[in-house]
C-alpha cells in the first residue's frame, strides 16, 4: 500500500501547472485505476476551516452562515450518489476507486461556489476503501497553490490574506471584480470592496 501511495504522490507532482495557466484535466493515477476495479464501498471525508468562511475579507470570505458552503457540498455529494454516513463523511456502497477519486477531486471545481472558495477554506479532503481503510488524502493538492487548484486562477478574486506565501508572486494585483457569491447571499461592505481581494491580472 505504501508503494501505491508513492505512485499517487509522484503522479500528482508531475501535474504541477505553470502559474497563470489553466490547470490540467483530472485523470486518475494508473495505480488507482488498476486497484479495486469491482464496485464496493468507498467513503469521502471532508472538512472546512470556519474562520476562513466567516471572517470578513481580506481574512476570509465573509459568509456568516457556514451552511452556505456545507449545503452546496452535500448537494454535490448527493448528486454523485454518495449518502451521509456521519458528519462530513459520505459513502457509496456500490462504486469504484476511480469514480470516488473523481468525485472528490472535482469538488473544488463545482460552479456552485465562487472560484477559489473551496480551495482556500478546505482543511481536509480524503477517500477510503472500506473495510480495508486504505486512505488517500489530497487536501494539500486541492488547496490554493496546490497541484490541483480548480479552474484558471486568472479568473479568480481571492481574499487577500488567504493567498498562501508560495502564491503571493502570482496573486499580486488588486482584483478587478468581487467574487460571485450568488444572488441569495447578503453582502457586507467588506465583501464589496475590491481592495480586500487579490487577482493574477
Image (cartoon, rainbow, N blue to C red):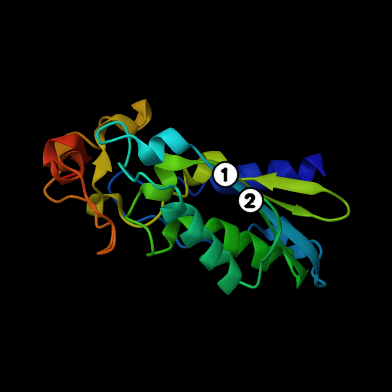
Q: Could you say which is closer to the camera, residue 72 or residue 10?
A: 72
Q: Position of residue 22 (x, y in %)?
A: 33, 56
The quarter of the picture where residue 96 lies is bottom right
155 sits left or right of 74 in the view: left
124 sits left or right of 52 in the view: right
Mark 2 falls on what kind of element?
loop
> In what quadrant of the picture does the N terminus appear?
top right
Q: Position of residue 48 (x, y in %)?
A: 51, 42
- Residue furthest toward the right? 131
How many badges with numbers are in the image? 2
125 sits left or right of 147 in the view: right
Dot 1: within a 10 Å radius of its alpha carbon, few (fewer than 14), some, or many (20 or more) residues?
some
- Residue furthest toward the top? 165
Q: Which residue is mark 1?
A: 47
Residue 129 to residue 7: above or below: below
Q: Residue at x 64, y 57 (%)?
A: 29
Q: Residue at x 66, y 50 (%)?
A: 87
Question: Does residue 148 appear anywhere in the picture?
Answer: yes
Residue 149 to residue 35: above or below: above
Q: Which residue is mark 2?
A: 88
Q: Position of residue 114 (x, y in %)?
A: 32, 55
159 sits left or right of 122 in the view: left
Real-space Cα distance between discs 1 and 2?
7 Å
Dot 2: within a 10 Å radius of its alpha carbon, few (fewer than 14), some, or many (20 or more) residues?
some
Do the numbered discs 1 and 2 sit on residues whose CB atoms are within 8 Å?
yes
Q: Position of residue 131 (x, y in %)?
A: 88, 54
Question: Which badge, 1 or 2, is on the more N-terminal residue?
Answer: 1
Q: Residue at x 34, y 46 (%)?
A: 63
> In what quadrant of the picture does the C terminus appear?
top left
Amino acid at each position: 500500500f505504501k508503494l501505491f501511495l508513492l505512485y499517487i504522490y509522484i503522479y500528482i507532482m508531475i501535474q504541477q501547472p505553470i502559474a497563470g495557466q489553466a490547470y490540467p484535466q483530472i485523470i486518475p493515477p494508473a495505480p488507482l485505476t488498476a486497484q479495486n476495479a469491482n464496485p464496493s464501498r468507498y467513503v469521502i471525508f471532508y472538512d472546512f476551516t470556519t474562520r476562513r468562511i466567516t471572517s470578513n475579507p481580506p481574512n476570509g470570505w465573509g459568509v456568516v452562515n457556514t451552511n452556505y458552503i456545507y449545503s452546496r457540498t452535500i448537494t454535490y455529494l448527493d448528486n454523485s450518489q454518495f449518502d451521509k454516513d456521519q458528519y462530513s463523511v459520505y459513502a457509496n456502497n456500490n462504486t469504484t476507486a476511480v469514480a470516488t477519486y473523481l468525485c472528490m477531486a472535482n469538488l473544488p471545481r463545482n460552479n456552485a461556489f465562487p472560484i477559489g472558495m473551496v480551495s482556500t477554506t478546505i482543511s481536509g479532503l480524503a477517500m477510503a476503501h472500506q473495510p480495508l481503510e486504505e486512505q488517500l488524502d489530497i487536501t494539500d493538492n486541492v488547496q490554493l497553490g496546490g497541484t490541483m487548484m480548480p479552474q484558471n486562477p486568472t479568473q479568480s478574486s481571492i481574499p487577500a490574506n488567504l493567498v498562501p506565501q508560495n502564491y503571493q508572486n502570482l496573486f499580486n494585483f488588486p482584483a478587478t471584480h468581487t467574487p460571485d457569491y450568488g444572488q441569495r447571499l447578503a453582502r457586507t461592505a467588506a465583501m464589496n470592496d475590491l481592495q480586500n481581494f487579490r487577482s493574477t491580472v
